[in-house]
Image (cartoon, coloured by chain):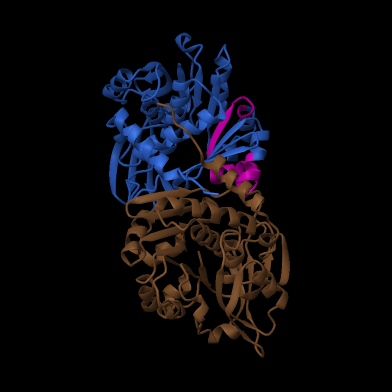
Chain colours: A brown, B blue
Amino acid sequence: MSLLIVGTMAFDALETPFGKVDRIIGGSATYAAWAASYFTKPINQVSIVGGDFPEEEMEALSARGVALEGVEIVPDEKSFFWSGRYHMDMNTRDTLVTDLNVLARFDPKIPESYQGSDYVMLGNLSPAVQISVLNQLRTRPKLVIMDTMNFWMDIAMDDLRKVLGMVDLLMVNDSEARQLSGEYSLVKAAKKIQAMGPKYLIIKKGEHGALLFYEGKIFSAPALPLEEVFDPTGAGDTFAGGFIGYLSHVDDISFESMKGAIIAGSAMASYCVEKFGPTKLKEISAQDISARVSEFISLANFEVKA
Amino acid sequence: MSLLIVGTMAFDALETPFGKVDRIIGGSATYAAWAASYFTKPINQVSIVGGDFPEEEMEALSARGVALEGVEIVPDEKSFFWSGRYHMDMNTRDTLVTDLNVLARFDPKIPESYQGSDYVMLGNLSPAVQISVLNQLRTRPKLVIMDTMNFWMDIAMDDLRKVLGMVDLLMVNDSEARQLSGEYSLVKAAKKIQAMGPKYLIIKKGEHGALLFYEGKIFSAPALPLEEVFDPTGAGDTFAGGFIGYLSHVDDISFESMKGAIIAGSAMASYCVEKFGPTKLKEISAQDISARVSEFISLANFEVKA
């Protein structure tokens, strides 16, 4: 099936306890497209970059089945740039620099050739941009998923509520779920968020895995226990890309399929964090992914005798 | 199989955001025996109480198949008393009062009738007491598991290392595993702790479930997402009791059995937290436990398509 991904394509500068990189490809749509490309094609990419964004990166994505007609290039400007430093626990980070550059004028136009996309992922962007994308789609996709962050809850709650009413699935981390709902218990938080619109809710808990809520049901996905996380940047976007790429591949949005999709997304994210930026995502094979999925199966599988 | 449990039998005063109770039965061996009694008998209880410990509680345990010959009663003294207040997140608590009372002189003598116990659980006690118990056992049990806490790491590390070298399985929470090993990554922490003696290690992560480490293998058990935790007191001891009770029942200490035991223990703990003290543990039926185990199966079960 066809998959539409909207998000950033950017440069990041990163500092982790394991090292430092000054300028590496980043952005939610970059990570998501790489991850999804192992499962489905075509991928209809929507983003904006400056004249500095490398041609090789575009060619590499294109070779993976990623259509780039929806990626606006502004030759005389710079791409979005983010710089951050991770703390020892790798769960908290300080933003050092955020240069919006071309992102400040991001007003995506969905190309005619992208109409009819079956699956849609709205990366973390201003809710107004997310709404604009959905309003341009002439046929309702089979599934629309979105990411967001606490920043939009702080400054654009009205728009955020509007887009929440238009999507099928929201994915946020645990602290964002608590902020959005005002509830500490994630079970209570899920009920309140589902009442805002999304039938499906995924709460990401980092090293503790993820929870999927749908109607009264819950699925608890483990995270792969890792000796070290080298660089967590992009793990959430990689998870989202693997998740929706898998769903687009199996073309089934039942609760059961979504469980498999969470494991697929988790497997991709577990690779992502092994090297700086999307480096590792570009190196793996389908066999590597199967092997990682098998690790999740052994990790979670159990039997209880009567 | 026969199960030996060593730990406290006590009174607790508890304050949670949901209510307050001035004096309720508590103690690690109390919770563990109630939980284990749903799976196995006989249970050989080793503890110490004062003259104030209620006869009805002893009778109720006895009716569940718990032998009390190893429970020393000191008529003119008081039972161990602990009082604590939980914070809103229910993960952190302040100790308000710790009156050791009879516990200060606890020097357990293992009755002759307890010799040959197949499974042994050493509740959280001074490592010296744990060592003394193991030294009194004439035949090596099939499995010895132990609990401990940060307090003993602070004040009795030498003895703690000694007892770690004598047991098969340690269960601690994540912050205790980090303190004991000096490693933040739980995978690295597990390797260091296993090198101290216990072949098996369970790291409890509260609302995030538990991890079991054995040789190179890891099992990640989910926790049941709960709307509210009414009172977390005793949840860890209940988990331990359900865990070893299940193992004693199936009489198999393979990695596969231990996975089932963790789910059994988690099911018992999920009941424990629903009411103050061990109240709920006394009310449930075998059917309730099966139903809760089934909830864990649906929660964790998934399939990934190729």
Q: Residue at x 39, y 55 (%)?
A: A213
Q: Is residue A73 above or below residue B67?
A: below
Query: With A288 as the anchor, is B251 left or right in this view?
Result: left
Q: Tell me where residue A155 appears, x and y as whole percent.
A: 43, 79
Q: Is residue B125 magenta?
A: no
Q: Residue at x 62, y 62 (%)?
A: A87
In this orientation, does residue B91 appear? no
Q: How many marks?
A: 0
Q: Tell me where residue A61 appears, x and y as whole percent.
A: 65, 70
The residue closer to the viewer here, B26 or B175, is B175
Q: Residue at x 50, y 64 (%)?
A: A1
If the image is split into quadrants, where does the C terminus of chain A sit? top left
Q: Is residue A41 above or below residue B229?
A: below
Q: Residue at x 60, y 65 (%)?
A: A234
The residue closer to the viewer here, B72 or A181, is A181
The residue closer to the viewer here, A259 or B278, is A259
Q: Is residue B206 above or below residue A47?
A: above
Q: Is residue A276 above or below residue B240?
A: below
Q: Residue furthest bottom?
A: A76
Q: Tell me where residue B280 appears, x and y as whole percent.
A: 30, 35
In this orientation, does residue B142 appear? yes
Task: Give the quadrant of residue B195.
Answer: top right
Which region of the structure is painted magenta? Answer: B163-190
